[in-house]
């Protein structure tokens, strides 16, 4: 069987029923060593396969709701990942995560994996339109920069949504003529406007423009002279278009 001598321990555990989930090759080697064949175990195999399938536990069904209807490779990997993390928490004696939270986390991870696949395909096609030789170094740096831009857009999405809401509110207030004269000056209604952050409460968050500049600086440090300034602008514009298509702003609800 071309097995190591120490493999007899595995065979002994298999004979005593103490080896969980043996491989098909191990079973075949065991039958071969016993001068037997699969025909000799057809009866117990048929009895086992004739049993009704086990249904997932209710908690498990709720947790997998975040992957419902998706049969992609990413969904399969996330399902296996969820099973392993659930078993690891149980072995460590930790409190299990609520099924609804697990479903939401799996749904977010699935969307993130799908976004990264779309981004990689888009960057791969955009590299061929940069006007430079699409070498492996160029492709890798372009993908890294695209991911940096995507991350910057993702991190500042809430800020952009809030600024967009403030702009709409500002237009509504001006359209309705809400400027009121009180005493010696003019007072404008500030309800609905984002107030500036109070001083002394941690480091101020970077704006989208600052994060995008940092992303380009990091990419240039990773590959000096690999991409031109025009190539960086072209890649950034392409990533921004893809982000707007996949993450449209939700309409404001009155």
Image (spheres, rainbow, N blue to C red):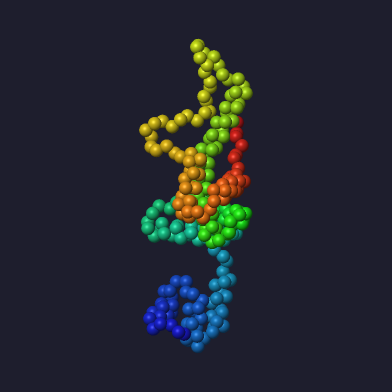
In front here: 234 or 29? 234
> Residue 210 at what x, y percent from top left?
48, 41
Q: Which residue is the extreme one toward the top?
A: 183
* Residue 142 coordinates in the image, percent (x, y): 54, 54
Placement of 226 over or under 171, stated as above or below: below
- Viewer-closest of 62 and 29: 29
Across and down, in percent, residue 86 comes to 45, 57
Apparent side of residue 106 relative to residue 200 in the rendered image (left or right): right
Question: Residue at point 52% right, 18% down?
Answer: 187
Residue under the image location 60 percent in, 59 percent down: 71
Q: How many marks?
A: 0
Q: Quadrant of residue 175?
A: top right
Which residue does the image show at 51% across and 40% down from the upper left? 209
Q: Quadrant location of residue 117?
A: bottom right
| Residue nearer the viewer, 171 or 227 | 227
Foreground residue among 157 and 98: 157
Residue 8 visible somewhere in the drawing: no
Write the residue at 50% across / 30% down. Answer: 194
């Amino acid at each position: 069987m071309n097995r190591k001598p120490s493999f007899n321990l595995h065979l002994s555990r298999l004979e005593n029923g103490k080896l969980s989930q043996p491989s098909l090759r191990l079973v075949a080697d065991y039958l071969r060593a016993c001068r037997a064949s699969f025909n000799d175990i057809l009866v117990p195999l048929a009895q086992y396969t004739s049993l009704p399938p086990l249904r997932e536990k209710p908690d498990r069904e709720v947790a997998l709701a975040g992957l419902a209807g998706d049969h992609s490779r990413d969904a399969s990997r996330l399902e296996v990942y969820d099973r392993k993390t659930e078993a690891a928490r149980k072995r460590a004696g930790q409190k299990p995560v609520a099924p609804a939270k697990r479903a939401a986390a799996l749904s977010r991870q699935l969307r993130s994996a799908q976004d990264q696949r779309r981004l990689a395909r888009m960057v791969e096609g955009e590299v061929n339109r940069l006007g430079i030789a699409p070498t492996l170094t160029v492709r890798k740096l372009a993908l890294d920069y695209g991911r940096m831009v995507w991350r910057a857009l993702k991190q500042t999405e809430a800020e952009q949504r809030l600024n967009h809401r403030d702009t709409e509110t500002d237009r509504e207030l001006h359209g309705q003529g809400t400027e009121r004269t009180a005493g010696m000056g003019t007072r404008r209604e500030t309800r609905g406007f984002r107030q500036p952050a109070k001083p002394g409460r941690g480091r101020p968050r970077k704006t989208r423009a600052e994060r995008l500049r940092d992303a380009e600086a990091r990419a240039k440090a990773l590959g000096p002279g690999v991409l031109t300034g025009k190539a960086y602008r072209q890649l950034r514009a392409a990533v921004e278009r893809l982000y707007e298509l996949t993450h449209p702003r939700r309409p404001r609800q009155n």
